[in-house]
Image (spheres, helix red, strand yellow):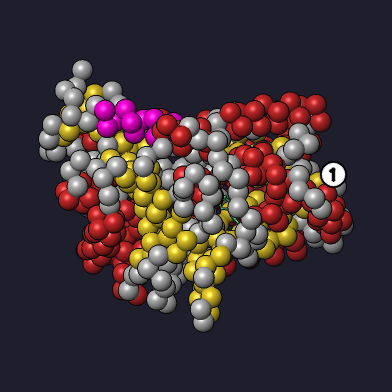
Amino acid sequence: MSHDPEPLTARLRLDRKLLPRRLLVVSNRLPYQIRIAGDEVTLERGLGGLVTAMDPVMRSTGGLWFGWTGSHHPVPSSIQVAERMGGGVSYELRPLELSQTEVSRYYLGYANKAIWPLFHYFQEHCEFNDEDWESYCSVNRKFASKVVSEYRDGDYVWIHDYHLMLVPAMIRRDLPDADIGFFLHIPFPPPELFQIAHNADDIIEGLLGADLIGFHTPSNARNFVRTVATMTELPYSVSGGWLRKDGRRVKVGDFPISIDCDHFERMASRPGIDDEVRAIRDNYRAEVLAIGVDRLDYTKGILKRLNAIEIMLARHPDIQGKFTFIQLSAPSRTKVSAYRSLRGKIEQMVGHINGRFGGKGCLPVDYRYEGHAQEELVAYYRAADAALVTPLRDGMNLVAKEYVISQIDGNGCLVLSQFAGASRELTHAIQVNPYHAESLAEGIYRAITMSVTERRSRMARMRQIVRNNDINWWVEHFLRAQRDAVRHRDNQPQ
Ligand code: GDG
């Protein structure tokens, strides 16, 4: 028996006319970790933006989610996530198992030591090698075959993220008429950077197997189209948001991902939360609380954030002893050395700041290297006077949107990196360049000393923007574009 440990989110308010007969979502990891004890199967929801966004979608549409289990233990071949939710929909997991070699070459290797750093503009972290690439190809083939074996006419195959960029073309080869969409959750770099990947052509070929390729922002979509256009040896033509290859048209667009606002607002106003918020504030005894919530990842800019906090405290003695920054860092990709060494550096820096400014009242930085339940995160969001979301590069960043929507009393201030996709929409945040330490420090100081009137007016605008473009809007926007893409798949370019 499987069961869902968290309460079901209510179904999204999706336009049923846009929904496919059956949705097949394909991503590297399943959204749930599967634990087996005797006959009992329990599910624990995974962390990360893809799960936050797509789990409510699947709970509303039903369908199949294909992904790696994340462990080497055998699991049942099909697992039901939610109970039947009315309307005949259900949501099932289709686990794929990977060998240790595949995990180390495909996942830790090509996906996370080559593509992840490259697409986030960290070329100095990139490690390309043939063995990792070959494993990436064979695991992509494994995913494609599994999907093809379960595919039925009328299904819509929606492939997600940088681990599976070859899957669209692999499925297309076997199912020439299938409806296939691809969404990239991370940035797409400019062609000059992308071509560092020695398999750049294969990746582009792989992606172009889809009918629709979606990115978070117009500049990512433009980078992709420019990349295709500059790879002149490939027989593509580019026009507007359409690419053409072998008589087939592929649509490219931007679809800024979002969150299930109703779900976050419900969590932010649940019974008992006011006591939790008070307990957090009492615990820190700071006049001003700021928060950072990130997977522990070098792209999230945690070190530069801490450095800016040190500069701010040094420049503004008035807030020493009155300010606490809480950094909640969920462990991530701990087998990749860049992540391990980052952890050490962060711990050192936290110790240094606390040594320098501690002892004058409250703790300057409270750093927690552990995962938290989503409800707890929301209590922290509500308790914090400001959120520091300062990635060095980020596809979107859902934490920014979660913080804004959790401010049900209209308070709170968001400090947001200009290099997060979310900065296009959240123009009323204090936008900062995290590479410039002094202005980051001043941005944080400005946020925490801003007048209540200004803070409330900025927050009201941001809440409205996130509400208007929530996860319902994102799914519908994508599915509508997919319908358009399929309709024009075989048409001549205008
Ligand atoms: C990728 C892209 C894009 C974090 N710690 C805990 C926890 N989280 C949740 C947050 C949020 C999610 O993880 C993180 O999402 P982000 O969007 O900020 O970042 P990535 O994981 O890097 O996501 C990103 C996203 O995909 C979607 O397309 O926005 O740019 O990099 O939801 O709340 N959740 C729980 N405990 C934690 O300790 N439960």
Rendered location of residue 260, percent (x, y): 58, 42
**Measured from the top left, where is residue 213 in percent x and y?**
32, 38
Q: Residue at x 31, y 45 (%)?
A: 155
Going 19% across and 22% down the picture, which residue do you hit?
Answer: 493
**Which percent across, then down, holds residue 246?**
12, 35
Indicate the secondary structure of the residue bearing disc 1.
Answer: helix
- Quarter in which the C terminus is drawn: top left
Q: Is residue 144 magenta?
A: no
Q: Quadrant of residue 255?
A: top left
Q: Residue at x 55, y 36 (%)?
A: 13
Q: Main secondary structure of the magenta part?
A: helix
Does any portion of residue 437 appear in the rendered image?
A: no
Q: Label 1, on which residue?
A: 318
In the picture, residue 145 is in which quadrant?
Answer: bottom left
Give the residue type that dot 1 points to.
Asp
Q: Nearer the viewer, residue 198 or 142?
A: 142
**In the displayed structure, would residue 385 be above or below residue 359?**
above
Magenta span of residues: 477-487
| Farthest-out residue, top | 494
Closest to the observer: 181 or 450?
181
User: Residue 417 in the image: x percent, y percent?
Assistant: 57, 39
Asked whether, in this view, residue 215 is left or right of residue 424, the answer is left
> Is label 1 within 8 A of ligand 1 (CB to nearest ligand atom)?
no
Q: Is residue 43 visible?
A: yes
